[in-house]
Image (cartoon, grey):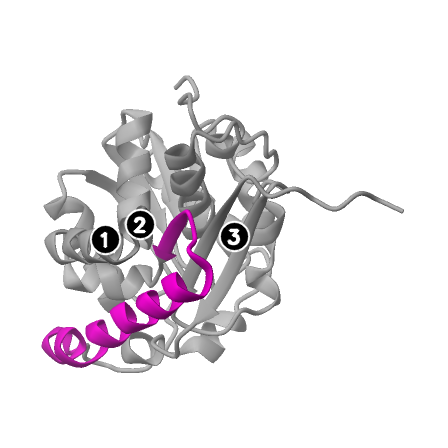
Amino acid sequence: MSSPRTSTGSIAWLKPGALDRDSLDVFDMTPRDIRLQVFAMPLSTAMMEAEVFDGTAFDRELRPQVLDVVRGIEAYGHPDFTVVTGDLIQSAMGPEWDRRLRSDIAAITGRGAATAMTAVTDCLDWLGVKRLAVASPFRDQQNDHILRYFTTAGYEVTAIGGYPTHGLAQVRQLPDDAPYAKGMEVFRADPTAEVLFVTCPLWPVGRHTAALEQATGVPVLSVANTMIWAALHAMGHPGGVRDFGRILEDPQRAPAQ
């Protein structure tokens, strides 16, 4: 009989949508001594299904709901680190809005916090890079939000590309190798990129991360591996996770470029 696993920390992940098979690799990239709890809110349709995203309405109506759920998570489990994802929504709202959301989450919990996009930009700063290529499962109109976010935050997007999807079902219908194919496409468009960011946890990024790093020679970031990195980095955890990106091998020391 195996001995019970001893937890040295906990992460709460609030995600805008259900946890499905393609999201499960986040558990594989979480060290065994870290407890990961997942909480879901049905927010994805606010961005994915609508032709026009109303940021004012989202801020007025749904942002308070997100913070209320964070309060419930804090009362339920007192996690050491809380992450709220929703990379496309956060990109549309912009870096300053996103930073305020992280501050509000940290104020509620009294501990470490991140959003999908602050985890990515914090990781870029830790790596010491400014130039990134971006692959997504989104249509051009939505990729414009991501491009604007990084540009406003002071980064240079060397290339960005996606697919003409309209809704969650179409993203999930993309071929299994779509993250790899699109990642290689945008990196080859300008190989001077210092990092490849493959956004959105709705498609199977994790299983292609190691192959993309080998093919491109640069760190590959995703929503999942950067949120786990942010938590481990804040906790001082040594990581030791392989096959899901260099950043998880040692979250305390940036890999050499």
Q: Give the residues drawn in magenta, as a range.
A: 54-83
Residue 251 location (% of width, % of height): 45, 29
Which of 116/83 is in front?
A: 83
Q: CA distance from mark 1 to mark 2?
A: 5 Å
Q: CA distance from mark 2 to mark 3?
A: 20 Å
The answer to whether residue 106 is above or below residue 127 is: below
Residue 154: name its quadrant.
top left
User: Is label 1 in contact with label 3 (beta carbons under 8 Å)?
Assistant: no
Dot 1 or dot 3, earlier in sequence: 1
Q: Secondary structure at mark 2?
A: strand
Q: Earlier in the sequence, mark 1 or mark 2?
A: 1
Q: Is residue 135 left or right of residue 106?
A: right
Which amino acid does the dot numbered 3 rest on? Val
> Badge 2 is on which residue?
114
Nearest to the observer: residue 7 or residue 142: 7
Kind of residue at disc 2: Ala
Name which residue lies at 52% across and 27% down: 238
Q: Amino acid at mark 1?
A: Arg
- What residue is disc 1 on? 102
Q: Could you tell me which quadrant the C terminus lies in?
A: top left
Instruction: Answer yes or no: is residue 140 visible.
Output: no
* Coordinates of residue 248 in the picture (x, y in percent): 50, 34
Q: Is residue 115 above or below residue 197?
A: below
Is label 2 or label 3 in front? 2
Q: Residue 80 colored magenta?
A: yes
SS under mark 3: loop
Pointer 1 with pointer 2, Cβ within 8 A: yes
Q: Is residue 52 above or below residue 142?
A: below
Spatial separation of the CA atoms under disc 1 and disc 3: 24 Å
Q: Who's the residue at 39% across and 48% down the image? A: 81
Kindly identify which residue carries mark 3.
Answer: 205
Q: Choose top left, top right, bottom left or bottom right for residue 33.
A: top right
